[in-house]
Image (cartoon, helix red, strand yellow):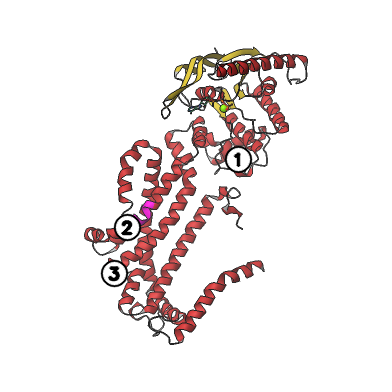
Amino acid sequence: MTALSKSWERAVVPLFILAAWEVFSRSGFLPAALLPAPSVVLHTWGDWIFGFDETSQANTGRWFADALSSAMRVAAGYGIAVISGVLLGIAIGWWRWVERTVEPTIQMLRPVPPVSWIPLAIIWFGIANKPAIFLVFLGAFFPILMNTIHGVKTADRNLIRAASMMGATEQQLLRHVVFPAALPSIFAGLRIGIGAAWMLTVTAEMVAVKSGLGYVLWDSYYFLRYDLVLAAMASIGLLGYATDALIKVLMSAALHWQHGSTLQSREG
Amino acid sequence: MASIDLRNITKIYRDAKRKRDLLAIDNVSLSVEKNEFLCLLGSSGCGKSTLLNMIAGFEKPTEGTVTVGGTPVDGPGADRGMVFQQANLMPWLPVWENVAFHLRLKGWRKADRRDAAQEYIDMVGLRGFENHFPAELSGGMSQRVGIARALLLNPQVILMDEPFAALDAQTKMDMQEELVAIWQKQRCTVVFVTHSVDEALVLGTRVAVMTSRPGRIRELIALDLPRPRDTTGPRFNDHKRHILNLIREEGMQQRQAAVA
Ligand SMILES: Nc1ncnc2c1ncn2[C@@H]1O[C@H](COP(=O)(O)OP(=O)(O)OP(=O)(O)O)[C@@H](O)[C@H]1O
Ligand SMILES: [Mg+2]
């Protein structure tokens, strides 16, 4: 009963907005093409996915292929960012000499917005997957790196003492103490990183790639198909939400030991 | 041969920011025999932890040498089990994994680690809590996990830094009894830091009373009292009176030094 009324509570505002939008679009106040009604967007979206009546023209039935090519770019760039960001972050956080030699360069590169790399990315990698993967990597790398460094530096020194009292070598300290201690912070970085990854895939696809959800979005804009634009926006939002939810599941599995010791765990 | 040998130990903490050095330990020499239970007694800030950390290998003496079992100490190692003032358990590992952490480092298989941990978990009376996480334990229980973890190393030497300071009187008494029983069974050497005269007299075979900063050994007192210790007996109280007098004198000198 309470669960049901809770989900009802959550749905009230979105349902109201959708209904108002539907009514507004059909009222003829604006040309229907400029702000397609939700029902129209849903119809187009359906055709894009299942291809029943070609309302989405050349895109009909191609949604899974588009979503997959975007998702693969995210996965590739994000995967590289996770591995390099965590490893380099641990090295910078742990060894002073690595910090001294690498940190200044990183601090110089970090404030440069990833999207401003687009021209160079196209020159270097051409128009295909590679520039998109490169941009995704740039966007996800820095939040993951910074959070990993923070996690390592704030690891409890006493735990390191306890482990070295039990005979841990430096490598064991990193693996069995520093890494798990930094994990909550690393996951915070992973969640910021995945948002950046989707943002940059879509941006790259609008400019430098000829496939994927971002490409469909930008292409439909040129052809004045705002229903497809909205369907593409919703698709990107949905996939972004799904990947974030996946990371949250991984996080609560990896950090289950925090249950009962943090504010967050108070929520049911 | 003594189990622990401190020879002419001096420790100076260099304070780079304030450009002032702090003499924490001033020329301390001390030998602890095998199977001894030595209590280091002294007021707050007199350098007890510093001394213990040098035996453990976390700190290096500025001058002098520390040897344990005949070999000079050069960094921490599993031959010296330490029980910290805060339990310092890995919060992401359940109780049994914390107790068997040393075996994890040695690459033992999970089932073997689990079996080995059980003996020590039983020893400190935590059966039934094997799969609890540190956040789910009380302070006294965490402290017992820390003790089990140090015992599993089966070390020649156990170092304890005020492990019971944060416990209530009843739990403290239970844990002291347990600790003495374990020490008698395991035949190891214990150095136990405390600032409680009663605790030192209940536990130790010898008490080293330290001076206030800089830390020196003021007096070494051998306790030939039978166990379990009778905390109301006349000999216990003679010792107590004597030590309290030492501490009082120490405090007075300290104050005069401050006035002068
Ligand atoms: N890492 C350090 N750097 C600088 N000074 C230190 C450091 N550790 C301890 N000291 C100083 O050395 C002195 C002795 O400290 P220590 O921790 O050994 O005292 P203690 O006897 O264990 O006190 P307590 O009973 O309060 O734990 C203190 O004056 C302290 O300020
Ligand atoms: Mg101390």
Q: Would you identify the image quadrant in which residue B247 lies?
A: top right
- The residue identified by callout 1 is B95
Q: Chain of mark 2?
A: A
Residue located farthest toward the left when viewing the structure as drawn: A123
Residue under label 2: A114
Where does the image place residue B167, in percent across and percent down from the top left? Answer: 67, 33
Q: Position of residue A142 (x, y in %)?
A: 37, 51
Are discs 2 and 3 less than 8 Å apart at CB? no
Name the quadrant of the N terminus of chain A. bottom right
- Going by the image, does A218 lie left or right of B180? left
The part of the chain drawn in magenta is A133-142
Q: What separation in Å lies between label 3 and label 1 (alpha carbons)?
A: 55 Å
Magenta segment includes A136: yes
Q: Residue at x 66, y 67 (%)?
A: A2
Q: Position of residue A172 (x, y in %)?
A: 45, 37
Label 3 packing within 10 angstroms: few (<14), some (14-19), many (20+): some
Residue for badge 3: A210
What is the count of numbered marks? Answer: 3
Query: What residue type is disc 1 on?
Result: Val
Q: Quick one: quadrant of the C terminus of chain A? A: bottom right
